[in-house]
Amino acid sequence: MDNMGEAMELEAGMWPADRPVGAHFSVYRSLPAMLDILDELDVRATYFIEAWNTDRYPDAIRDVASRGHEIAFHGFRHEPWAALDRPREAALVADSVKRFQDLGFRVRGFRPPGGGVTPDSRDILEEHGITYISPAGEHVVAERQQVILPFQWKYIDAFCYFEPLEDMRRSSGYPPGLLGPEQFEEIIDSCIAEIVETGGYAALLFHPYLHDDPERLAAMRRIVERIADDPRLWRAPCADVAEHVRERPHLFAAEAGLTSQSWMR
């Protein structure tokens, strides 16, 4: 899962100045419903959370962790990460890691808001104990002290449900407008079928703010059920997957043709 509360809307200037913060619908309606689904199906996930939320929603973060899910971070307030300069990036990483640590969580994973990183990201993150990164990309890579666990845009709920991704949907051959839960299920079904046939890895992403809708929530349940019920699939939080990769570097390292440049293709 990605994004918590108002962080992204505040960073993007979309949150009304006169509206108070700290009571976002996604935290109190969507998130508990999604966590209940994961509980019922005995699936553990990773939640990439903006560090800003450690002050606004500490109890929600603790609840996520108490249910067995991994806490990782998603920037401080969902900054467009690839556009940051080194001093700003270093300050945000240091502040974010400390805020989670003060709340009792030693975060090991990072997903850059917007999917992109900077030329300095790996060095900065490594200095603060981040052992895996989950950017947009295709190839799993074990290199240096970090593992790259990429996501692909077409396998996230926002590809179907988020209006600003209109151009991305059109470039993939879809008609104008949002896609429905049925189409999202079809996309994920094709992803699962490919993994079963060929082996491999995929990150499936769900955003609580996009699931305050019974039909979308029901689609999420069906997707998670398929994953949970298929003995050919290993489902795990990102930290567990990163450790699995780290123990097999010969399969994922540069000599296999995958370098820090190739995982962004």
Image: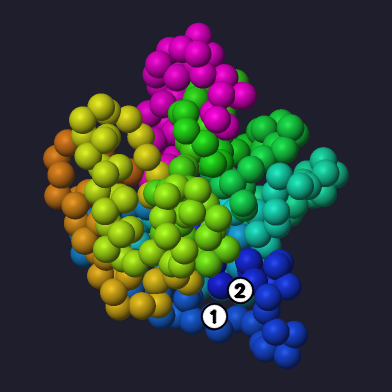
- Horizontal side of 84 relative to 98 (left or right) equals right
Front position in the image: 181 or 178: 178
Residue 71 in view of the camera: no
Residue at (27, 28) in percent of width and height: 199
119 lies above or below 177: above
Image quarter for residue 95?
bottom right
Q: How far across and how far down the image is residue 85, in percent?
A: 83, 44
What is the magenta range? 237-265
Residues at marks 1 and 2 touching, judged by CB atoms closer than 8 Å: yes
Q: Mark 1 points at which residue?
A: 24
Q: Name the residue under label 2.
A: 6
Prevailing secondary structure class for the magenta stretch in the rendered image:
helix
How many labels, in total? Answer: 2
Residue at (54, 80) in percent of width and height: 24
The C terminus lies in which quarter of the figure?
top right
At mark 1, the secondary structure is loop
Residue type at numbered disc 2: Glu
Residue at (26, 35) in percent of width and height: 194
Q: How far across and how far down the image is residue 205, in percent?
A: 42, 54
186 lies above or below 85: below
At mark 2, the secondary structure is loop
Front position in the image: 83 or 63: 83
Disc with the residue nearer the chain's start (1 vs 2): 2
Q: Is residue 242 magenta?
A: yes
Query: Badge 1 local density, few (<14 within 10 Å), some, or many (20+)?
Result: some
Residue at (40, 44) in percent of width and height: 203
Residue type at numbered disc 1: His
The N terminus lies in which quarter of the figure?
bottom left
160 lies above or below 229: below
Q: How far across and how far down the image is residue 14, in percent?
A: 68, 75
